[in-house]
Amino acid sequence: MKQLASRHLLTLSIDLHPIYDLGTTPTGHRRIVPVSGGSFEGERLRGEILPHAGSDILITRGDGVFQQDVRLALRTEDGALILMTYRGVRHSSPQVAQRIANGESVPPTDYYLRTAPFFETGASQYEWLNRVVTIGVGERRPNGASYQVFEIL
């Protein structure tokens, strides 16, 4: 196999509350970004991101890379609950990182934002999500983020 095959799983649009800045800790500059809601939509599932049920525990490492640790609660339009977790990284030039920090809209081609989402659910109609590997390609927006999530086949 010379390359991985994939198919689009969903588009995720996340709304965020203001950041809690913990400052510099022994592991890096730590921030907590609570999720205020959002939505997701794909060919096989769609629904909402539940408010007050998720957050991004973000660290800025010593090399300037932002490392994400995210938990989201999803509710499909038919009422199923799904836990979505992912780790990821974002890196860019210091100038682009500053523009993002200032709340500017920066084209996603100006930085790298990739995640590795996993899903967990007890809903029988979505149990197939428990067995897939996915990759997200992201865009940081003022007050949120969006991702194109692809299932690796």
Image (spheres, rainbow, N blue to C red):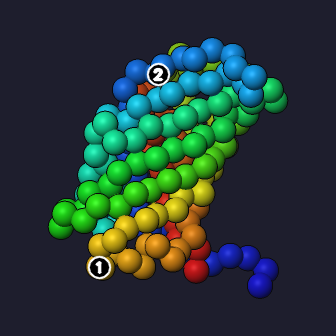
Q: Which residue has dot 2 on it?
A: 19
Quadrant in which the C terminus appears: bottom right
Image x and y of residue 48, in percent: 26, 52
Which kind of residue does numbered mark 2 sit on?
Answer: Ile
Q: Which residue has dot 1 on it?
A: 125
The answer to which of marks 1 and 2 sits earlier in the sequence is 2
Quadrant in which the N terminus appears: bottom right
Residue 109 versus residue 128: which sits nearer the camera? Answer: 128
Q: What element carries label 1?
A: helix
Image x and y of residue 103, in percent: 48, 20
* Pointers 1 and 2 in contact (C-beta within 8 Å): no
Q: In this view, does 42 lie above or below 137?
A: below
Residue 65 image-quadrant placement: top right
The residue drawn where x is 48% and y is 19% is 20
**73 with respect to 93 (left or right):** left
Residue 97 image-quadrant placement: top right
The residue drawn where x is 28% and y is 46% is 50
The residue drawn where x is 62% and y is 78% is 5
**69 with respect to 34 (left or right):** right
Which kind of residue does numbered mark 1 sit on?
Answer: Gln
Visible in this render: residue 36? yes
